[in-house]
Amino acid sequence: MVDSVEISRVNIRDTVSFDISVWMNHPDDWEFRPGLSVEGQNFIISDLNDGSQMASIELDDEQMETIQRDRVAELRVKFQVHGMHGKMKKIHPIIADGKAKKLATANWKTTQSVQFN
């Protein structure tokens, strides 16, 4: 199950794009089904399983105009798990090429329709 959702950035590319971080409770959790909606100037991400609101952000006029025109939004999701992804305190370099190892991250990009209330 999803623990929390944070909207970190809103951009306008071809359509409105939202960068979000999704924190899961366990590495084997697969239950993330977002529903997107707009109420007034607020963009809301809700859970399709139970209908609860997970995150919201207020959009400016240009973003609202773009999302009303397209009726879709692009989500750029970064999945993270508590206790698994944190800051590395000690870097273990790869001797062959001099680069440090990175923590595993799961990224997801999708375009979904937006409901207007």
Image (tube, grey):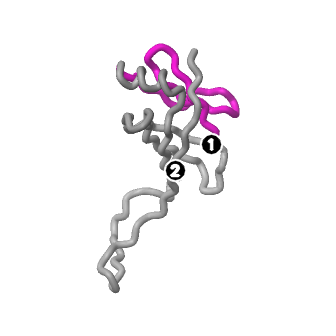
Secondary structure beneath dot 2 equals strand
Magenta region: 32-60
Give the mark nearer the N terminus: 2 vs 1: 1
Secondary structure beneath dot 1 equals loop
Is 6 drawn above or below residue 81 in the view shown?
A: above
Q: Which residue is drawn at 46% across and 20% down?
A: 42
Question: Which quadrant holds the N terminus?
Answer: top right
Crowd class of label 2 (few under 14; some 14 to 19; many from 20; radius 10 Å)? some
Most frequent secondary structure within the magenta stretch = strand
Residue 20 drawn at (x, y percent): 46, 41
Q: Residue 15 sits in which quadrant? A: top left
User: Mark 2 near mark 1, Cβ–Cβ under 8 Å?
Assistant: yes
Is 111 drawn above or below residue 66 in the view shown?
A: below
Q: Which residue lies furthest to the right in this view?
A: 49
Given residues 71 and 101, the one toward you in this image is 71
Residue 111 drawn at (x, y percent): 55, 39
Residue 100 drawn at (x, y percent): 34, 73
Question: Which quadrant holds the C terminus?
Answer: top right
Q: How many labels does the image show?
A: 2
Relative placement, left or right, of 10 versus 24 is left
- Distance of mark 2 from mark 1, alpha carbons? 10 Å
Q: Residue at x 33, y 84 (%)?
A: 95
Given residues 84 and 107, the one toward you in this image is 107
Amino acid under disc 2: Phe
Residue 37, magenta (yes or no): yes
Relative placement, left or right, of 96 versus 40 is left
User: For residue 32, which numbered disc appears in the image?
Assistant: 1
User: For residue 79, which numbered disc appears in the image?
Assistant: 2
Q: Residue at x 55, y 43 (%)?
A: 110
Q: Which residue is drawn at 50% across and 59% down?
A: 84
Q: Residue furthest bottom?
A: 96
Residue 114, magenta (yes or no): no
